[in-house]
Image (cartoon, rainbow, N blue to C red):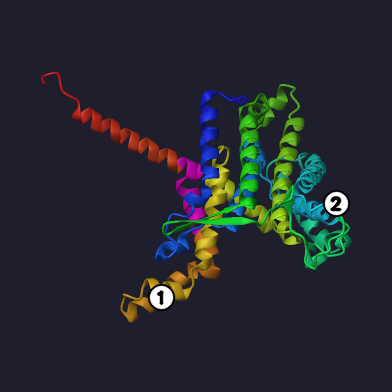
Amino acid sequence: MLGLNPKDTKFLFIVIALTLFTPFILQPFPAASGMAQFNAGYPDLMQRIAIFGIFAIGFNILFGLTGYLSFGHATFLGIGSYAAVWMFKLLSMNIIPALILAVVVSGLFALVIGYISLRRAGIYFSILTLAFAQMSFALAYSVLTPLTNGETGLQLALDDPRILDGASDAGSLPVTNLFGVAMNSAQTVAVGPWQFTFSVGYYVCAVMAIVAFYLSLRIFRSPFGLMLRAVKSNQQRMNYTGLNTRPYTLAAFVISGMYAGLAGGLLASMDPLAGAERMQWTASGEVVIMTILGGAGTLLGPVLGAGVIRYLENIFSKIDKAVLHGWFEWMPDGLEDPLVAVISQFTGKGWHLTMGLLFMLVVIFLPGGLIEGGQRLRRAFSRKGKNVDANTAPTAAE
């Protein structure tokens, strides 16, 4: 079905179900309970998880399959955002033309950057991509200011032409839409003490993420994906056989850049603003961490890594000293204050320390990422179940 074998088809449908039911999965605690601060089922966060999941899926096609580590992939994220906002300003607030332009323009830039960078491999390739990213970031603040609006960022204005939409009589800026359905529209449904929010923007991003995942699944299972794995295994040996691997690696780089452009276009569709900060090296580092944390080279790992990082960022950044004092108020003051002082270094503005520690632990003890951790747990429980069955099975004497 859908060009997949039965096992992959089942896997795809599981991913679809998890994606569509995310508003329930990320809202496990009642709204009025003390644990509600650990809920994450609101539109902005769910949209970002889906968008950065797309970004990580695309990066995994390059890094996970070919082994080429790019430190400048956020360049295409920023380019996609700029292209989408320009489409909103000039043509229409419908997100479809904006997303198409974002993917096409990012692909063209990826073709040029990849053609030059892929002349080198290993750390030299990584440094080249980082150099291109920093040049793009600097150009957005200087030479290309007429196109990027510099530090202010590219944003909508009341006097934008928007040829297909026509002149707006309203005194406020228009909102992005999908054939007339506003992207920021949402419906909150109360089910007992729980409140679930269903957002048009999230489900648009979710559908895009499902399509992106399906395409990556087809790539992984195709002869093209097998060739990319061979490049990662031993590119030099392939070159000795007379096979030119550059077209394959360049194709992977362009596809990966187009995924990043789609993610950038969706970011602009949720919030029509594009700034050069999306092209910084730190943004490129985030997608590397997401992919490695989830499991590079696996299908679901990058999406899982993106979700975990975005969720933990949201949770830990909200925990300040007041929240911590509320948690530990039952302790004596002589213990409560020092404990809060220590823990507060890893929450609030210091949440990056927590993420750094988590990443270190995963790299040291789970080189295959969270996916490897899940596989180890499954094998452990499987062995435990077999041992129980062996112990309870009747003997020959019985």
Q: Residue 371 in magenta?
A: yes
SS of the residue under disc 2: loop
Question: Farthest residue toward the top?
Answer: 396
The quarter holding residue 155 reads bottom right
Q: Position of residue 29 (x, y in %)?
A: 42, 58
Q: Quick one: which residue is furthest to the left in this view?
A: 397
Q: Amino acid at mark 2?
A: Leu
Q: Is residue 391 left or right of residue 282?
A: left
Q: Residue at label 2?
A: 91
Question: What residue occupies the far front of the structure in this picture?
Answer: 169
Q: Quadrant of the N terminus?
A: top right
Decide if residue 293 is in sight here. no
Please provide the residue range marked out in magenta: 357-372
Q: Are marks 2 and 1 in contact (CB under 8 Å)?
A: no
**What residue occupies the far bottom of the structure in this picture?**
333
The amino acid beneath tag 1 is His
Q: Quadrant of residue 115?
A: top right
Quarter of the image with the C terminus in it: top left
Q: Is residue 30 left or right of residue 183?
A: left
Residue 212: quadrant of the picture: top right
Q: Which one is nearer the viewer's eye here, 200 or 149? A: 200
Give the residue drawn at x 76%, y 57%.
Answer: 134
Using the numbered discs, state the Cα–Cα distance from disc 2 to disc 1 in whole angstroms: 52 Å
Residue 253 point in image, percent of width and height: 73, 39
- Residue at the spot 85% in from the left edge and 64% down from the top edge: 142
* Residue 325 badge: 1
Say few, some or many: other residues with alpha carbon within 10 Å of mark 1 (under 14 / 14 to 19 / 20 or more): some
- 323 in the magenta segment: no
Residue 162 drawn above or below residue 112: below
**Image mark count:** 2
Q: Main secondary structure of the magenta part?
A: helix
Q: Earlier in the sequence, mark 2 or mark 1?
A: 2
